Image (cartoon, helix red, strand yellow):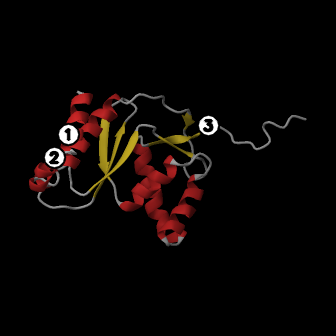
Amino acid sequence: FYDISYEFYQYLNTQSHLLADYPWLLELAHFEWAEIAADIAEGEWPVYQQGDLLTGIPVLNPFVWPLVYQWPVHKASLLKNSQTTLILMYRDLKDHVQMMELNHLTLNLIQLIQNNQVLTGEDLLILLAQQQQQSIEQLRKAFDDFLRILHEKQIILGVSSVAFNCNANNKS
């Protein structure tokens, strides 16, 4: 099934006449392919522990895919109107594919965590505030809410259990 949906998506890339009549079709095909790809993706779950997401280094579920579309492809009845749609597709710890709509701030946070191995949640808050040109105080409530929701949904699994020690290789 994976190959069929991917091949269909590739086929649609060459069919500009179809896309003229159905401008959302290519994104819908990609969304359907991504759902199957998320279901069968292989990989290992990272090592993590429960802890304070602000003082620890948040560990992101490795099976997350932030998706940005020009059409609300997850709501077929709304394909009449173009609107930027941000979706996070992910697999939970029971291997069920889930999805949630994002706003730009949450998308940015997830992208920061994806590229992070050393920043604490508090460091990420500071970086996000700088990127959004907001004060930390303005952003803190939303940030705390995002972390809590992402943790509840198993998008953030916990905090890193790996201690980073710059002197680990220096033996006395």
- Numbered circles on residues, count: 3
Task: Tell me, for residue 147, which label it has, or none.
Answer: none
Q: What residue is pinned by disc 1?
A: 11
Marks 3 and 1 in Cβ contact (< 8 Å): no
Task: Compare residues 51 and 65 and report the one nearer the observer.
Answer: 65
Q: Is residue 137 left or right of residue 102?
A: right
Choose mark 3 or mark 1, whichever is in front. Answer: 1
Q: Is residue 98 left or right of residue 117?
A: left
Which quadrant of the structure image shows residue 65? top left
Q: What is the three-letter code of the residue carrying label 1?
A: Tyr
Residue 153 visible in the current orientation:
no
In the rendering, at what x and y percent does residue 109 appear? 46, 55
Give above or below for 46 relative to 74.
above
- Give the class, few, some or many, for how many residues have Cα within 10 Å of label 1's Cα (few <14, many ≥20): few
- Which quarter of the rendering shows the N terminus? top left
Which quadrant of the structure image shows residue 163? top right
- Which quarter of the rendering shows the C terminus? top right
In the rendering, at what x and y percent does residue 97 appear? 31, 35
Q: Secondary structure at mark 3?
A: loop
Q: What residue is pinned by disc 2?
A: 15
Q: Secondary structure at mark 1?
A: helix
Give above or below for 139 relative to 172.
below
Residue at mark 3 to residue at mark 1: CA–CA distance: 45 Å
In the rendering, at what x and y percent does residue 104 appear? 37, 61
Q: What is the three-letter code of the residue carrying label 2?
A: Gln
Task: Compare residues 156 and 8 and report the one nearer the observer.
Answer: 8
In the rendering, at what x and y percent does residue 144 appear? 47, 57
Q: What is the three-letter code of the residue carrying label 3?
A: Ser
Residue 21 visible in the current orientation:
yes
Marks 1 and 2 in Cβ contact (< 8 Å): yes
- Give the class, few, some or many, for how many residues have Cα within 10 Å of label 2's Cα (few <14, many ≥20): few
Residue at mark 3 to residue at mark 2: CA–CA distance: 49 Å
